[in-house]
Amino acid sequence: MAGGNTNSGDTRFLHQRLMNESSANSMVLTRYAWLAIGTAVVTIGLKAAAYFVTGSIGLLSDAIESLVNLAAAIMELIVLSVAARPPDEDHEYGHSKAEYFSSGAEGALILIAAYSIISSSIGRFAQPQPVEAAALGLVLSSVASGINLVVAQILLRASRRFHSPTLHAGGQHLMTDVWTSVGVIIGVAAVAISGWQQLDALIAIAVAVGILFSGVRIVRSSLMGLLDTALPATEREQLNAVLKKYQQQQPIEFHALRTRQAGARRFVSVHILVPGAWTVQRGHHLLEAIEHDIRTTLPQTTVFTHLEPIEDPASWQDQELDRRSVAKT
């Protein structure tokens, strides 16, 4: 919003923009959530069938992870619907941070799944059982893995396009599932060939350790988002490029550039210093142009600009914010 302060008209304009963008994004993002749910249901069926025909604890661990996928996908659908709600009196910047709760809960579910797999595997290691109909089980598991691979790539591309931590966590989880399944398939094949039954339980434990690390990464990413993490360095460079372009064209300066990201939405605030002889209209026109360029460069960005006279010493007191930013980087 251009100007020194945000008035009621600016607030209504901001709310309307957030409502329009949230509604459009909601329709798209929830489709991906439904895709994840459908994928989880199909792969659960395939992996459960693979376990029942083989009796492999490794394939059971793979099926358990797909159950987590289903729970996570349902949670993603709910959270994306919440995140798409328009701003209200209690949440004037929208509900986009709800996405971080989803990715955090998904990471927690992965940790629970890892514990469950390890518990089952220890018992099976002590009392091994033969793997039967290995070929059929491996075919079923391979088909499930292929489906997960395709959908994971779709979700990851969508997460980059819409800057959605929920879709990113879902895609990463599915990719973990893919690599897990590859390891299980190789291991079960090795069990069938070698006849070493304890290897089945060791494979399941290795699967659990792998998804344990995945869960920790997802939880950490969620917590960082809740802490109002700044935009990535590449995006901050794009912001600086926009501002420096105007700085080279006109006798202005800028400082106190601050950024944060909440789900799919970015927030940027910056102080623009202009000659004190400028009219309010000229300064306002410049700020509107800068805001427009920033939103064009980084879509789904809410920009707050503050206009100050360049000759006033008080206008430069906020340079401390720039020094803190440099110190962090």
Image (cartoon, rainbow, N blue to C red):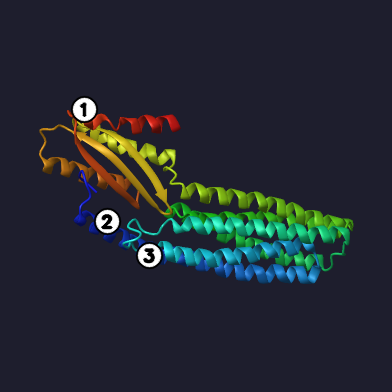
The residue under the point 62% across, 70% down is 42
Tell me the number on the disc at residue 216.
none
Image check: 276 left or right of 66? left
The residue under the point 20% across, 45% down is 3
Real-space CA distance between mark 2 and mark 1, rounded to the nearest whole angstrom = 31 Å
Quadrant in which the C terminus is drawn:
top left
**Label 2 or label 1, whichever comes before in sequence order:** 2
Q: Secondary structure at mark 3?
A: loop
Tell me the number on the disc at residue 85.
3
Residue 220 in the image: above or below residue 113: above
Please state the horizontal and vertical placement of residue 126, each as a whole percent of the image.
88, 59
Q: Which residue matches tag 1?
A: 313
Q: What kind of residue is marked 3?
A: Arg
Real-space CA distance between mark 3 and mark 2, rounded to the nearest whole angstrom = 14 Å
Task: Give the class, few, some or many, for how many residues have Cα within 10 Å of label 1's Cα (few <14, many ≥20).
Answer: few
Tell me the number on the disc at residue 14.
2
Please state the horizontal and vertical placement of residue 215, each as a whole percent of the image.
62, 53
Task: Give the class, few, some or many, for how many residues have Cα within 10 Å of label 2's Cα (few <14, many ≥20).
Answer: some
